[in-house]
Image (spheres, grey):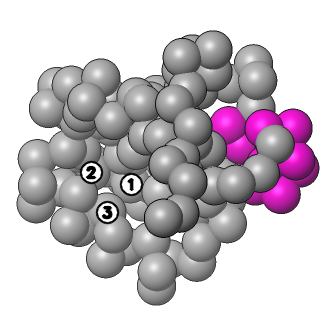
C-alpha cells in the first residue's frame, strides 16, 4: 500500500519491480488487499494486457491509521536512529510516510 500511496496507480509489473516481488508472491497479496476493499485491479485503458492497481478510498484512509507505525517500530528497537536507517533503508529522514521522529517514544527498558 505504501508504494501505491507514494506513486499512485501502478501496473502490477511496476508494483512488482518496486517491491522486488515476483508475480507468484504479489498476486495473492493484491487479491487479499482487493478483497479487503483497499485497492482495485483493472485492465489498462491503453493496453488491456496490463493490470493496474489503485488504492481505493478505504485504502487511502488506511494511510492515516498506520502513519505512526515506522516511528513505533524505531522506538521498539534498541538502536540509534541513524543506524536503523542504515540497516533497514527506510523510512528515510525525508520519506513522506516517516512521521515525526521528534515525538518518538523510546522502548521500555527490560525489567
From the image, state whether disc 3 or disc 1 is nearer to you.
3
Residue 51 marker? 1
- Image side of residue 7 versus residue 33, left or right: right
Q: How far, Cα to Cα, is label 3 from label 1?
A: 11 Å
| Label 1 Cα neighbours within 10 Å, binned few <14 / some 14-19 / many ≥20 | some
- Residue 25 visible in this rendered orientation of the protein: yes
Residue for badge 2: 41
Sequence order check: which comes first, mark 3 or mark 2? Answer: 3
Looking at the image, is mark 2 or mark 1 earlier in the sequence? 2
User: Which SS class for mark 1?
Assistant: strand
Task: Give the position of the N terminus as an image quadrant.
Answer: top left
Query: Which residue corresponds to the image point at 30% horizontal and 23% vertical from the top-left?
Result: 64
- Vertical placement of 29 versus 36: above or below? below
Residue at 81% in and 42% down: 80
Q: CA distance from mark 3 to mark 2?
A: 8 Å
Q: Which mark is residue 30?
A: 3
Q: Nearer the viewer, residue 99 or 104?
A: 104
Q: Horizontal and vertical percent for residue 44?
A: 38, 43
Amino acid at each position: 500500500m505504501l508504494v501505491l500511496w507514494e506513486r499512485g496507480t501502478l501496473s502490477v509489473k511496476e508494483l512488482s519491480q518496486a517491491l522486488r516481488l515476483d508475480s507468484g508472491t504479489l498476486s495473492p497479496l493484491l487479491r487479499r488487499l482487493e478483497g479487503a476493499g483497499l485497492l482495485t485491479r483493472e485492465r489498462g485503458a491503453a493496453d488491456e494486457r496490463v493490470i493496474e492497481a489503485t488504492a481505493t478510498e478505504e485504502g487511502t484512509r488506511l494511510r492515516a491509521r498506520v502513519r505512526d507505525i515506522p516511528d513505533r517500530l524505531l522506538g521498539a528497537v534498541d538502536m540509534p536512529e541513524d543506524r536503523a536507517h542504515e540497516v533497514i533503508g527506510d523510512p528515510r529522514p525525508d520519506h513522506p510516510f516517516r512521521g515525526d521522529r521528534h515525538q518518538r517514544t523510546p522502548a521500555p527498558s527490560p525489567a
